[in-house]
Image: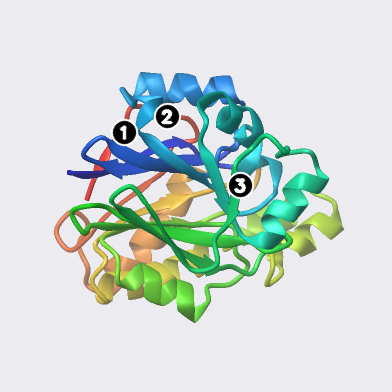
C-alpha cells in the first residue's frame, strides 16, 4: 500500500513522507530535526524506514532540519548539484553528512525517485516523483513561477500529486509585502498563484491524475478555502465532479494525521 503523509506545508516549513511496505523517503525537511521526529512519531512512521532525504532547493523552509536529521539517523541527502553547493555555503549541510547529487533518477531500496528542474529563485531547484515498490507514483511539485512541460508530463503520468497554489494575486498585490518581494513572487521564478494552479489542475484531471492536493499556501496572501474554491470552480465549470471524477483538498500547514493512500 503506497501512501503520502504531509508533515508540514507552507512558508513556515515543508516536508512529506512517501513510501510503502515499511520503506519510504522524505521530500524536503523544512523544520527542525526535533519537529520532524515528532511529526513522524505522531503519524506512526519509524525513522528507520526512511531511506533518504530529497531536498528540492536551499531555501530554509525546505531544508532547515537536513543537517542534524541526516547526521543523527545516518541518512543520505540527495539534491541537485547547485542545491548542495548552496546548502554547503549556508552551513545547512556539513562534511559529516552523506550527500549525493541526483541528476535524473536514483533507487532507494525498492523505490525509484526522479528529478525534474523547476523555475524558482534558487540555485538549481527541482521537484521529485517517487515510484513505490508496487509501481504507484506520487509527485511533490511546489515552488515554481510557471509550470513547465517536463513537470506537467511527470504529474500527468502519476497517480497522486501535490501542486502549488501559493497565493491569490489580488491579496498579494494589496498586501503588506514590499514591492520587490511581490515582484519576485509574481515572476516566472516565483510561485504559482491560485488561478495558475487551477488552470493546470484541470489538465491533470483530464489526462488521468485524479488524486490531487494543493500545497505551499502563503500564510499572508492566501486562504485555504479560497485556493480550494478557485480550483474547484475551474474543474466544475468543465463538468468535472469532486469525489466522483477527482479528489482535491488542501495540504494542512502542520500534520493532522492525514494519510493519502494512492
Quick one: label 1, few (<14), some, or many (20+) residues within 10 Å? few
Is label 2 in a helix, a strand or a loop?
loop
Tell me if 58 is positioned left or right of 104 in this view: right
The reply to whether dot 2 and dot 1 touch (C-beta < 8 Å) is: yes
Who's the residue at 27% across and 52% down the image? 132
Q: Which residue is mark 3?
A: 99
Who's the residue at 54% across and 22% down the image? 35
Percent position of residue 155, x then y? 37, 68
Compare marks 3 and 1 and give the one earlier in the sequence.
3
Q: Which residue is mark 2?
A: 255
In 3D space, how far apart are the residues under numbered discs 2 and 1 (Cα atoms)?
7 Å
Q: In this rendering, is residue 254 above or below 133? A: above
One can see residue 167 in this view: no
The reply to whether dot 3 and dot 2 touch (C-beta < 8 Å) is: no
Q: Which mark is residue 258?
A: 1
Compare marks 3 and 2 and give the one earlier in the sequence.
3
Amino acid at each position: 500500500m503506497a501512501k503520502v503523509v504531509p508533515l508540514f506545508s507552507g512558508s513556515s516549513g515543508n516536508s512529506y513522507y512517501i513510501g510503502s511496505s515499511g520503506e519510504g523517503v522524505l521530500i524536503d525537511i523544512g523544520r527542525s530535526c526535533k519537529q520532524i521526529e515528532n511529526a513522524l512519531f505522531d503519524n506512526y512512521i519509524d525513522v528507520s524506514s526512511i531511506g533518504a532525504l530529497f531536498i528540492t532547493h536551499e531555501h530554509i523552509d525546505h531544508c532547515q532540519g537536513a543537517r542534524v536529521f541526516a547526521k543523527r539517523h545516518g541518512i543520505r541527502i540527495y539534491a541537485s548539484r547547485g542545491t548542495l553547493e548552496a546548502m554547503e555555503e549556508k552551513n545547512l549541510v556539513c562534511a559529516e553528512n552523506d550527500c549525493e547529487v541526483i541528476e535524473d533518477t536514483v533507487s532507494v531500496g525498492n523505490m525509484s525517485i526522479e528529478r525534474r528542474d523547476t523555475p524558482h529563485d534558487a540555485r538549481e531547484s527541482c521537484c521529485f516523483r517517487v515510484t513505490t515498490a508496487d509501481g504507484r507514483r506520487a509527485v511533490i511539485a511546489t515552488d515554481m513561477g510557471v509550470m513547465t512541460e517536463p513537470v506537467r508530463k511527470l504529474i500527468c503520468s502519476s497517480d497522486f500529486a501535490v501542486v502549488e497554489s501559493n497565493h491569490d494575486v489580488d491579496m498579494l498585490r494589496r498586501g503588506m509585502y514590499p514591492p520587490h518581494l511581490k515582484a519576485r513572487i509574481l515572476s516566472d521564478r516565483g510561485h504559482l498563484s491560485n488561478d495558475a494552479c487551477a488552470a493546470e489542475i484541470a489538465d491533470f484531471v483530464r489526462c488521468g491524475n485524479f488524486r490531487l492536493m494543493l500545497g505551499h499556501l502563503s500564510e499572508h496572501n492566501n486562504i485555504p478555502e479560497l485556493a480550494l474554491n478557485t480550483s474547484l470552480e475551474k474543474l466544475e465549470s468543465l463538468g468535472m465532479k469532486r469525489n466522483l471524477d477527482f479528489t482535491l483538498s488542501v495540504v494542512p500547514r502542520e500534520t493532522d494525521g492525514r494519510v493519502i493512500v494512492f
